[in-house]
Every structure is written in structure tokens, then in C-alpha cells.
Amino acid sequence: MRLVIGDGLASEAMITFTSGTFLVAMVLLLNANNFQIGLLAGLPTITNVFQLLSIWLVRRFNNRRAVTVVCSLLARTPLLIIGLLILFFKNIPVETIIFILFFHYFFGSVAGPCWNAWMKDLVPEKQLGVYFSRRTSYTQLLNIVLGLATAFIVDYTRNHRITAELNVYACLFIAGGIAGISSALFLSATPEPLGKVTTGNILTILQRPLRDHNFRRLLVFNSAWVFALNIATPFFVVFMMKRLGLSISYIIGFTIISQLCSILTVRMWGRFADRFSNKTIIAICAPLYILVLLGWCYVGIYTREYLNLLLLLVIHAGTGISNAGINLSLTNISLKLSPAEESVVYLSTKNIITALFSFIAPLIGGYLADYFSTRTLSVDAQWKGPHWQKVIHLLSLHEFTFLFLIAAGLAFVAVELLVNVKETGEVAKNVVRRMIRSNIKSNLREYFLIGQIIDLHDAFRQLIRKRVPGRKQKEVAEDVNSIS
């Protein structure tokens, strides 16, 4: 399990250097359009349809470690090729980068289900939440350090014209390829519990998860959720760079704030997911993320720059807190609802189906961004007085904020589908909210000033109960909660 954490750290270094903000910034330098950016965002998911090959390999060799390690090595080599091509040939076409990255994501997708099934047998089920939340906090902390350092290097190099900015991105891809190969070496030393091999026709096998009513409901929710998110998510960085004109350092800084909030909360979500249920955590975090999507619609409407930056700060903090619970719980609930002897089949089917929606969404998002690029919509409030008139912009929609509003609406619909999913140990989300609030309070009491405020708040609640005669205790408690 320590070796798997080492694999996670090396993989995170690879992801930091070769995806996200740095990948988008590099292809924008190469004059990529919105559709190409959407295609790049969809590549990691559409290649999941090739996970059928993963099932065949596991059935053929019954060695998940060998399949994972070999495919991981093949997946990291294209990153080295891209770095060397950019370093020596400079302005290569964006289409070439997309073509090479296809093989990076293809082999990574084949390795994915084998790794997931391997981890399901390696990590005890009762420790899934705690272990993977700890692993995630470590990888995100590394992402923060590397992301911040790399952003400063990119901006410093560009501002002082030490070398071409593309050369920096080329070196990042080479470093990412080396880190990715290191993660495969960690996995090669990790033991693998003996797995059970499924038998029968492969098409018949793939139908088993679809005949599982509860797992099928999870697939419906997961597909709707990733579709809603991927319409907008790939364009957050593009929006900040092109519409707001923010530098790489600013964007990485906000990303780090998001990751810090994720690190501070992911272990809490892991504990509560193990204690109650993953579904309950999703039901709490998903509405918060919908609010975050709506918040993006208001970025840029203020004339004072510090207000836009403050709003971005709040948005990224909310993103980190909500995504920490959603991503952890979605992974764990998929593992939990997959039978041990058929986990590769179940997880592959889930990844293949959600991949189609994840791939289509950013393509539609890129098309819609281009479509709305010549259209704007403003919602204003106007006040008139005897000698004055004031107009306040309540909402301003353009090509990107249209996407964010559409994504929020679709995410709201997706959350309603979660109700149909059944999970062992499920607890009402209101109970978990009270437990989380109590947990946070007990931690905050360690700080004297905040502890005094909480004590005064509790005393106020007791006073209200005593001062309201002739009321049922339950009604009084509801009123007190509303006041609080």
C-alpha cells in the first residue's frame, strides 16, 4: 500500500506537468481553437471504450499487475515524444499533439480497470475511504508544490525572455514522461492478490452490469453527472486566460487554493463515507458544486478587478471542497457495488459508458462556445431617483458563461437521479450534516476565540428553548435551527 502511494505521487507529477492549465496554455500558443480544446478534454475519456481490451488481457493472462505495468510504460512514452518534438521542431500542428496524446490515453485506459480491480483486492474494503483519501491528500499536496513552482518558472521565463515559452512546456512533457515511467516501476514492485477470472462470451459478460438494476442506476447518474460537468470544466482555464487575461501564476494559484481546500476536507469525507455511505456524501457535495458553476456566471461582471479575483477565490475553494467528496465517493461506490469476482468487468463497463458522455460533452461545449461567441445577454437592475439613476449588472452572459449556466442546469437534473441508487449502510444526509457540523465544532473549540463564540451560540439556543412556552420541543428545535 505504501508502494501504491509512491505510484500515486509519481503519476501526479506526470499529470501536473502534462495536463490541465499547462496543456491548455501550450496548445493556445499553437493557436488551438475551442473545438480542439474540447477534443483534447474528451480524449482521456473516449479512449475508455478500449477497456474491452483490458478485460480480454486479464482473462488471457490472469495477471493484472503485468497488464497495468506494461500498458503504463507504453502510455508514458508518447509524453516524451511530444516533449522532444516541440523542443526540436517548435511549432508543430495541434493535430499532431492530439494524435500522439491519443496513444497516451489509450494505453492508460487499458491499464485503468486492471489497476482498479487490483486495488479492490489489495486494500481492505473497510479502509477504502480512509486509505484513498490519505493517498489523495498526499498527491494533491505534491500537485500544489509542483504546480506553483512550475507556474513561477513559466511566467519568469516568459517575462524575462530567457527562452521561448514552448521550450519550457517541452521540458515539462519530458519530465512528465520520466515521472510516469517511475510510477510504473513502483507498481511493478507491488504484490498482487490472486484474482478470479471471469468465463463466458465477452458480450454476455458485459451485459451483466447492465442487468444489475442498482449498478445500472449508478451508471445513469454517473453518465448524467460527467456530461453536465464536462460541458463547462475544460473551458474554465480558457475563460480565465482569454476573457480575464490572467497569467499562469494566477490560474495555478487559484488551482492551489482549490487543492488545499480539497486536502483539508478529503479525509473528513473519507471517514464519513466509510461510517455512513458514499451516496450521502455525493448528495451533500453535489449541490455545492452546482452553486460553484452558477458562481462562474458572475466572474468578470465587476469593474473592480479585486472583486472578480475575490469571487474566483470563493469559487475555487468551493470547487475543492465539493470535488473532494464527489470524486472520492464516486470511485468508492463503484468499487463497493462491483462484485469481487467481476470487478474488472463492472468497472470497465462503467468507464466505457461514462466515457461516451465525457467525450461528447466538451465537444458540444466547444461548439456552443463558438456559437455563443457572437451573442451576449445582460440582465440589469435599474434604480431611478429625482436626481440620479443607477444601473447594476445582475448577470452578463457570453460564450463561456452560457456554458456554465447550462452545465449548472444539467447537473441539477443529474443529482435527482442519485436518489434511485441504493448503497449498503446508507444514512439520511441530514444526519450526516449534523455529524459533520458537530465534528467541525469540536475541532474549532480548540481555538479559544472561536470556542467562545460557539459556546455563546449554544447558550443562545438553550435560552430560546426556555423562553418559548407552550410549543412542542420539535417545533422549537426547528425554529432554533432556522435562526442558527
Image: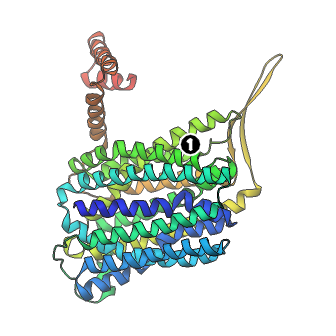
- Residue 339 placement, left or right of 139: left
Indicate the colouring scheme: rainbow
Residue lying at the far front of the rendered structure:
162
Q: Is residue 379 above or below residue 110?
A: above
Q: Is residue 35 visible?
A: yes
Residue lying at the far right of the rendered structure:
387
Instruction: Please tell me which residue lies in front, 226 or 196.
Output: 196
Label 1 Cα neighbours within 10 Å, binned few <14 / some 14-19 / many ≥20: some
Quadrant of the image containing the N terminus: bottom left
Name which residue lies at 26% across and 21% down.
Answer: 472
Q: Quadrant of residue 250?
A: top right
Q: Is residue 93 above or below residue 127?
A: below
Q: Amino acid at mark 1?
A: Gly
- Residue 244 placement, left or right of 355: right
Instruction: Please tell me which residue lies in front, 60 or 417.
Output: 60
Name which residue lies at 29% across and 28% down.
Answer: 441
Q: How many marks can you see?
A: 1
Residue 296 % position (x, y): 58, 45
Residue 452 % position (x, y): 31, 16
Q: Is residue 402 visible?
A: no
Residue 429 % position (x, y): 31, 43
Instruction: Please tell me which residue lies in front, 133 or 352.
Output: 133
Residue 412 % position (x, y): 48, 51
Disc 1 target residue: 295
Quadrant of the image containing the C terminus: top left
Name which residue lies at 83% across and 17% down.
Answer: 387
Name which residue lies at 35% across and 64% down.
Answer: 217
